[in-house]
Image (cartoon, helix red, strand yellow):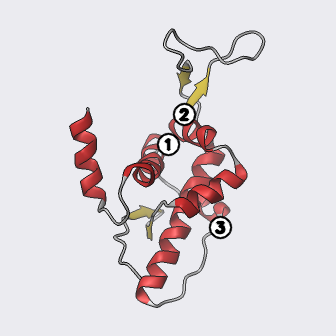
Amino acid sequence: MRKIEIPKVTIGGEEFPIYCDLYVLSQIQQRMDINDFERGIIGAEIIRDENGEPIRDDDGRLKLRFGKYDIDALILGLTCMINEGLIIDAEQTGTEHEPIEEKYIARICDMPLIELSNLVHETFGRCLTAKKNEPPEALNQKKNISK
């Protein structure tokens, strides 16, 4: 088994491993569209016309309004990512893990909403852009270069 470097996050005074991979994306996709998930975790809402059709700008991109977070998407993403981190950590250390429930995470999460949004979105983004087993620091350096 390959060694995976798993970042940690502290929620409600407890430290959890957090990781996103294709399995996590699959779990999320079983419950909601991945694009809706991403918009929900960053607080973006599609602007629609009077007929409910999405409005696009001159370049064909959807027009978005920010500030409406999908709390269910944040809880779902955070829980799936923590559970995957727990599974990987248990496999690498040869220990057992106890899955975390969404209700538990929602109750103990004490992060400000914007910080929670950033954490889930950055972890999600790492899965989409990082090479397998690439440390999170390498991705952050790539982000800074592309700005």
Residue in view at x 44 percent, y 54 percent: 127
- Tell me, yes or no, if residue 108 can be seen here: no
Q: Give SS at disc 1.
A: helix
Which is nearer the eye, 43 or 57? Answer: 57
Is residue 143 found left or right of 24 in the rendered image?
Answer: left
Q: Which numbered disc covers residue 43? A: 2
Q: Amino acid at mark 2?
A: Gly
- Image x and y of residue 113, in percent: 49, 42
Q: Which residue in the structure is indicated by mark 1?
A: 113
Q: Which mark is residue 101?
A: 3
111 or 100, which lies in front?
100
Mark 1, other Cα within 10 Å: few <14 / some 14–19 / many ≥20: some
Labelled disc at residue 52: none
Q: Where the N terminus falls, by quadrant?
A: bottom left
Distance from the alpha carbon under mark 2 to that under mark 3: 23 Å
Residue type, numbered disc 3: Glu
Disc 1 marks a residue whose amino acid type is Leu
Q: Quadrant of residue 37?
A: top right
